[in-house]
Amino acid sequence: MRTTISDPNTERSTGVPRLHTRTRIQAWDDWLARSGAALGTGARVEYEHFYFMLEAASAGLGVGIAPWPYVTDDIRFGKLTAPLGFLESGHEYVALRRATRSKKSSIFCDWIAKEAQDFHGSVPTSPPNPHSNP
C-alpha cells in the first residue's frame, strides 16, 4: 500500500496542521521515517475516519497522508495533490478463507487478487499531474 502527503506546496507546510486519522494514528510518523522528508510541524488534528480527514485536507484545513486507493479519484480530478509522490507504507490487505475452500470463495479470491494487481499497477511513482486529462 502506498501513501502520500496531500499538501499542494510542501514548503508551505511549516505550521500547517497535520491531519491524522484514528484508524492509522502512526501514519505520519511512519511516512516521515520512510520518506526521509523534513517537514515543519503544525498542530495535530485527529479525525475519526479517513473520509473526514480527506475532506479536511480538500478544504485546506491542513495536510494529510492517505493510501493511494483512498485518493485515486481526488488526485485524478485535482481535488488533492501529491507533490511528493507515493511511498510503500508496509501495510497490506489480505483475504482470509477457510482451509476447506468453496468454489465461490475461490472465485472471489482470484477476482480480488487480479483487481489488486491491476490497481497496484496504476499507482504513480511520481506526483501525478492533476491538470492532465484522465
Image (cartoon, rainbow, N blue to C red):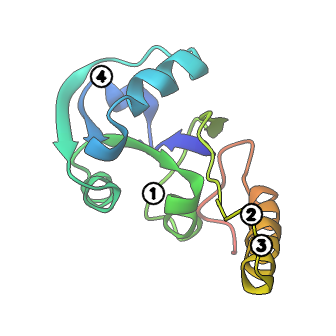
User: 71 or 91: nearer the eye?
Assistant: 91
Among numbered discs 3 and 1, the one appearing first in the sequence: 1
Choose mark 2 or mark 4, whichever is in front: 2
* Structural distance between the alpha carbons of marks 2 and 3: 20 Å
* Structural distance between the alpha carbons of marks 2 and 4: 35 Å
Among numbered discs 3 and 4, the one appearing first in the sequence: 4
Residue 105 lies, with reference to residue 2, above or below; the image says below
* Structural distance between the alpha carbons of marks 1 and 2: 23 Å
Residue tagged 1: 80
Residue 5, x across and y down, in percent: 47, 39
Residue tagged 4: 14
- Horizontal side, residue 31 vs residue 48: left or right: right
Looking at the picture, which amino acid does disc 1 mark? Leu
Residue tagged 3: 101
Provide the secondary structure element on which disc 1 rests.
loop
Looking at the picture, which amino acid does disc 2 mark? Ala
User: 119 or 63: nearer the eye?
Assistant: 119
Among numbered discs 2 and 3, the one appearing first in the sequence: 3
